[in-house]
Image (cartoon, rainbow, N blue to C red):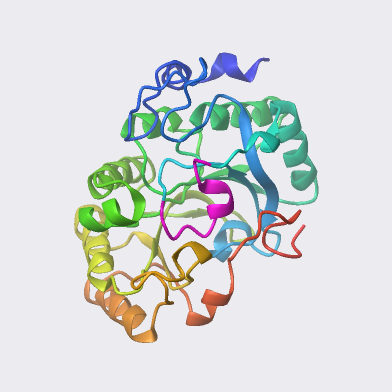
Amino acid sequence: MNPMSTIHPFFLESRQDCTLCPRQCHADRAGGSPGYCATGTGFEIASICLHRGEEPVLGGEQGVCNIFFTHCNLQCRFCQNDQISRNHLNTAGRSLTLDQVVQRLEVLLNAGARAVGFVSPSHVLPQVAAILQALRDRGRRPVFIYNSNGYDRVESLAALSGRIGVYLPDFKYGDARLAAEYSDAPDYPEAAAAALREMFRQKGVRLEFDGSGLVTSGLIVRHLVLPGQVENSRRVLRFLARELSPEIHVSLMSQYTPTQAVAADPALGRCLTAGEYGEVLREMERLGMENGWMQGLDSQNHYQPDFRRRHPFGDES
């Protein structure tokens, strides 16, 4: 079966008139006009690798088989994946065929991985849908994890309904000014709020687990606490607790580390302090949010990938 023949019409139409993400730049990606994200219709992938990540319930000791796509519909100044996420980068050498992608995934699935994660997929949903269907056509039934920056369109998420096991979005900003300054997306708080409501509609507050204690279905929201931006984090948590549910699962991350691009920036050029992270934790407690994960400040020494390596995160397979 041709995987493209079973892709949702919304995704196919977006190849000629791209409205996949909130930017809705209407690029003719199939015709060579790549739009804001500078991405065509091919499979431009920086890495396919096992990664244990921040939430142990997703992959356990084995890790998640993650697909790291190049480019992004956000251009966060502090992005830890800036080696591959910048839209001005030439990623021609990263192109794979669908068969090559699936073959690499099957090697890791055969080695014991039980989940496939799509990392930064918001601008490449036709490719995501093709990979997902190709694996299913081969009889593969991994848990599919949608690991996005939160800048998603409701229509795109609705077209994924029933196909994604775990939604793992960021919710970066409750402050439009900050979203404009740091990620070139002043509408981020509004767009991400709508996207989260749709994910919550699909999955609700409950996580489902397999016999090994790994998540098979549900919604986990990530939030990276930024230095000097405690009030932004408070706004994010208030939305989650008051507009969705205080029982929602949140991964509250303290791992922010300045990249070379922002090392000299007065606001972004330092790590988070224990006091700042503690203030955000106290807000979670005040809101009655008890489900999820927190990090120690030593996490600032981890999760810094180098995509020049065969495995960007070190010695994992």
x, y (%) of residue 111? 80, 50
Looking at the rendering, which quadrant does residue 40 occupy? Answer: top right
Specify start and end residues of the magenta stretch as a single range.
Answer: 76-88
The reply, left or right, for residue 136 in relation to residue 25 is right
Viewer-proximal residue among 142 and 103:
103
Characterize the magenta stretch by its predominant secondary structure: loop
Is residue 269 inside the magenta stretch? no
x, y (%) of residue 86? 50, 46
Residue beneath the point at 40% across and 45% down: 74
> For the view shown, which residue lies furthest in the front direction?
264
The reply, left or right, for residue 249 in relation to residue 178 is right
Residue beneath the point at 39% across and 45% down: 203
42 vs 216: above or below: above
Residue beneath the point at 46% across and 22% down: 11
Q: Quadrant of the N terminus?
A: top right
x, y (%) of residue 269? 42, 72
Looking at the rendering, which quadrant does residue 225 occupy? Answer: bottom left
Q: Quadrant of the C terminus?
A: bottom right
